[in-house]
Amino acid sequence: MASRDGRRKGPAKEDTVANFDMRGQRVTNQYNAGRDMNVGAVQTPEDLMTVLEQLNEQFTQAKEAGVLSEETAIDAQYQVTKAAQQAKKPDPDKKTMLDHLTRAKTLIEGVTAASGLVTTLAAAIQVVQKLFT
């Protein structure tokens, strides 16, 4: 809102910072999945293999942090491993790789704390679509 002299009225710049009352809230596990992986930089099938290996390590870390159950982590790792095995073949089947990565993504989609892993899997799916014909 403007005053008579045309200057804007309102809170000072330092007053615009949001303050949150965190009393009574507990954070038991905080996990930043996928933070060290750059799927966007993947240019070759070898680069993809590196990212898939890192992704499997992230599933292990998510399990150890209590973000994913052991069963979910193992199932997701299996799917990523199967996609990696397919990528290593002389004539890899794009559909098979996409199916495995999509299954891994579906397994963890409902876990809010693993949203970084979901994002990384979605990016890996896009890379597979781009790299393999």
Image (cartoon, rainbow, N blue to C red):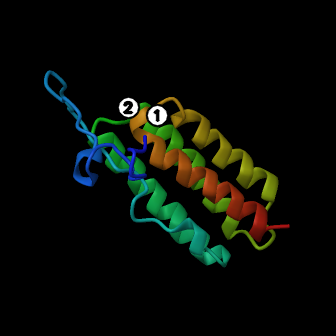
Whether residues under marks 2 and 1 lie with C-beta atoms below 8 angstroms apart, the answer is yes
Within 10 Å of the Cα at label 1, are there few (<14), some (14-19), or many (20+) other Cα atoms? some
| Relative height, residue 100 to residue 38 (above, below) | above
Which residue corresponds to the image point at 59% horizontal and 41% vertical from the top-left?
105
The kind of residue on which mark 2 rests is Ser
Which residue corresponds to the image point at 32% horizontal and 49% vertical from the top-left?
61
Residue 70: % across, % down: 37, 34
Figure quadrant of residue 94: bottom right
The quadrant in which the N terminus is found is: top left
For disc 2, the marked residue is 69
Report the front residue among 90 and 109: 109
Which residue corresponds to the image point at 48% horizontal and 48% vertical from the top-left?
117
Report the front residue among 24 and 32: 24
Report the front residue among 47 and 130: 130
**Numbered badge on residue 48:** none
| Relative height, residue 1 to residue 82 (above, below) | above
Report the front residue among 62 and 112: 112
Residue 39: % across, % down: 56, 66
Within 10 Å of the Cα at label 2, are there few (<14), some (14-19), or many (20+) other Cα atoms? some
SS of the residue under disc 2: loop
Residue 92: % across, % down: 78, 65
| Relative height, residue 17 to residue 41 (above, below) | above
| Relative height, residue 54 to residue 56 (above, below) | below
For disc 1, the marked residue is 72
Which residue of the protein is positioned furthest toward the right in this rendering? Answer: 133
SS of the residue under disc 1: helix
- How far apart, in angstroms, are the residues tagged by discs 2 and 1? 5 Å
